[in-house]
Image: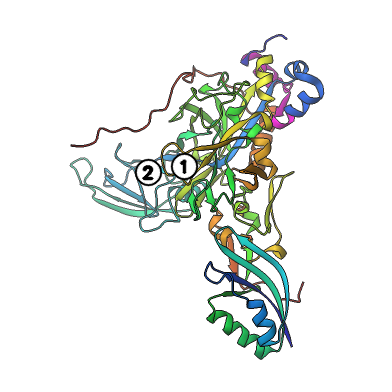
């Protein structure tokens, strides 16, 4: 087939002629019409995920008070925010807990800001000649502050291990509640709809890629922390278990609580559901092969969270068709499975992104730079103190 | 005569007590077991409808409490604020009665209160904290 470029696809989007399918729809089309026809007819495939992503947070600039203050410590609804940057800049991390609470944190503050609610700001400072004020307390909102942008160091994991528990007690984890003696299995990926599983070598996704983030347009800022493209892959190129990651940025003021939601995991802490959608251009037949990946072809490791070490033992390799069927076989038993990332919401995001592109409101952005293709993840091996 | 539904919660210690025998024989109650679940947390749940004299029922409940068996009247019902649900599925991981389950076509979480044994696990499992247990529901006999 003739290869397509980003520019050619954008031209079609502008004219309202681009053919856009979701990553689920494109599988159905390939089943009916074959790979070649699919590659030729389709221009863009939309992918999405809506799962708890701890590595999230927002930069805020509060504006200057009179007299001005150089904030040394900041709390938002009693959640500490990091302010070791300029006078009235701060970063509120999603997992930071409100002092004295375990069910309210930075993710809730972010959600309340997005909802347009007032948030209580408290700041203290040492007081300087140029910033004499030492204390400040009052309410701010999305409207009253200068910038507010989401900046998430690690989102959209390419794949992620499924979890189970061999011990005799309930484990409370970021993978949900794991019942004793292999009582259940949880998994946290949208499978064939998930962004980085549809472009396993990140050919079309890089620095500057325009995406759907939290209900508005955002961008890939960088590769995510712990980005690990060196992970073992299946024949189809899809990594088996957690691999590539993205660092994402977008205007918090334009986001909606529909796609950004605080989450509480008992005895673990606070996290945040983040809605991410990524359009993948059908550049050639290789891309057609990638975007038509099916749940049964995506494999991941089933890990025992009952073992507290860094390398949890892999009990077996499972595929997403099995995981999504509701049961997996483990030690000759059928064990119930449950998702943690919402496929329902992911479908909504993929459909919304498709609409934006069809209406010519969302153009594809060719990456300014590729993401590292050979990075690995180091463990933390500190030199012990003498 | 009264007729009411209860969930009995057994701990590992109270597991093997022959309580149905006592309820029938000592308190002259009619017992209809509707569901029994063993949660692999070493807890057992029994949903039963009990019919008998009001006074006998009251004494029977006292007897069960003394035996260390928790009794939850099922007019204490689990409610889900479904309009806020994001259909993540986290609650379905712990619901062994199948009251909370994913519809695997639409991938929406569906709640069937009639299957619920009020074990309470889902309340902790929902990351949005939209599941609670309250007294709002109807009593046995009211469908
Ligand atoms: S209390 Fe929750 S987890 Fe337990 S049976 Fe009812 S719905 Fe299921
Ligand atoms: S855990 Fe909560 S938000 Fe998730 S599906 Fe269940 S009720 Fe809905």
Name the secondary structure under disc 2. loop
- Residues packed near mark 2 inside 10 Å, few (<14), some (14 to 19) or many (20 plus): some
Q: Is residue A168 above or below residue A90?
A: below
Residue drawn where x is 67% and y is 12% of the image:
A4
Name the secondary structure under disc 1. loop
Q: Mark 2 lies on which chain?
A: A
Q: Can residue A233 be seen in this view?
A: yes
Residue drawn where x is 51% and y is 46% of the image:
A114
Nearer the observer, disc 2 or disc 1?
Answer: 1
- Label drawn at residue A62: 2
Q: Nearer the viewer, residue A272 or B123?
A: B123
Residues drawn in magenta: A7-25
Labels 2 and 1: the sequence-earlier one: 1
Residue drawn where x is 60% and y is 30% of the image:
A195
Q: In this view, does A55 lie to the left or right of B73?
A: left
Locate residue B51: give its quadrant: bottom right
Q: Mark 1 lies on which chain?
A: A
Q: Where is residue A254 drawn, in percent x and y?
A: 54, 39
Residue occupying the far right of the picture: A32
Q: Where is residue A155 drawn, in percent x and y?
A: 50, 35
Q: Which of A100 and A266 is in front in this view?
A: A266
Instruction: Report the quarter where the N terminus of chain B lies.
Output: bottom right
Q: Nearer the viewer, residue A120 or A273?
A: A273
Q: In this view, does B56 lie to the left or right of A120?
A: right
Give the residue at mark 1: A54
Q: Is residue B119 visible?
A: no
Q: Where is residue A93 drawn, in percent x and y?
A: 41, 43
């Amino acid at each position: 087939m003739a290869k397509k470029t980003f520019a050619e696809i954008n031209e079609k989007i502008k004219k309202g002629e681009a053919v856009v399918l979701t990553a689920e729809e494109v599988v159905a089309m390939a089943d009916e019409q074959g790979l070649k026809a699919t590659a030729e007819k389709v221009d863009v495939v939309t992918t999405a995920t809506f799962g708890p992503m701890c590595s999230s947070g927002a930069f805020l600039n509060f504006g200057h008070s009179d007299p001005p203050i150089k904030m040394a410590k900041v709390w938002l609804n009693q959640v500490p925010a990091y302010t070791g940057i300029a006078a009235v800049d701060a970063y509120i991390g999603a997992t930071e807990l409100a002092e004295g609470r375990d069910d309210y944190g930075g993710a809730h503050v972010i959600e309340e800001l997005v909802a347009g609610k007032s948030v209580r700001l408290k700041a203290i400072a040492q007081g300087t000649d140029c910033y004499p004020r030492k204390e400040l307390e009052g309410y701010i909102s999305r409207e009253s502050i200068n910038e507010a942008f989401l900046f998430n160091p690690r989102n959209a994991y390419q794949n992620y291990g499924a979890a189970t528990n061999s011990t005799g007690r309930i484990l409370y984890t970021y993978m949900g509640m794991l019942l004793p003696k292999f009582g259940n299995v949880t998994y946290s990926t949208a499978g064939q709809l998930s962004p980085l599983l549809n472009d396993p070598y990140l050919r079309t996704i890089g620095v500057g890629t325009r995406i759907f983030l939290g209900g508005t347009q955002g961008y890939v800022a960088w590769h995510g922390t712990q980005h690990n493209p060196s992970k073992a892959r299946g024949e189809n190129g899809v990594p088996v278990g957690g691999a590539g990651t993205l660092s994402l940025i977008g205007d918090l003021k334009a986001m909606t609580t529909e796609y950004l939601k605080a989450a509480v995991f008992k005895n673990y802490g606070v996290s945040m559901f983040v809605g991410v959608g990524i359009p993948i251009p059908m550049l050639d037949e290789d891309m057609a092969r990638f975007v038509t990946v099916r749940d049964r072809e995506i494999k991941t490791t089933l890990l025992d969270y009952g073992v507290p070490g860094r390398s949890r033992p892999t009990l077996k390799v499972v595929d997403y068709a099995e995981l999504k069927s509701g049961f997996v076989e483990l030690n000759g038993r059928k064990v119930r499975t449950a998702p943690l990332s919402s496929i329902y919401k992911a479908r909504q995001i993929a459909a919304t992104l498709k609409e934006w592109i069809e209406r010519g409101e969302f153009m594809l952005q060719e990456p300014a730079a590729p993401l590292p293709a050979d990075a690995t993840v180091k463990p933390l091996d500190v030199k012990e103190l003498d | 005569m009264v007729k009411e539904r209860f969930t009995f919660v057994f701990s590992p210690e109270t597991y093997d007590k022959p309580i149905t025998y006592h309820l029938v024989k000592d308190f002259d109650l009619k017992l209809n077991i509707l569901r029994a679940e063993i949660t692999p947390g070493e807890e057992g749940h029994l949903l039963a409808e009990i019919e008998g004299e009001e006074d006998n029922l009251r004494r029977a409940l006292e007897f069960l409490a003394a035996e260390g068996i928790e009794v939850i009247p099922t007019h204490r019902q689990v409610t889900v604020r479904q309009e806020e649900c994001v259909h993540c599925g986290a609650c379905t991981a712990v619901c062994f009665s199948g009251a909370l389950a994913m519809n695997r076509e639409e991938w929406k979480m569906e709640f069937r209160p009639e299957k619920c044994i009020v074990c309470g696990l889902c309340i902790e499992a929902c990351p949005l904290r939209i599941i609670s247990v309250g007294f709002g529901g109807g009593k046995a006999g009211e469908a």
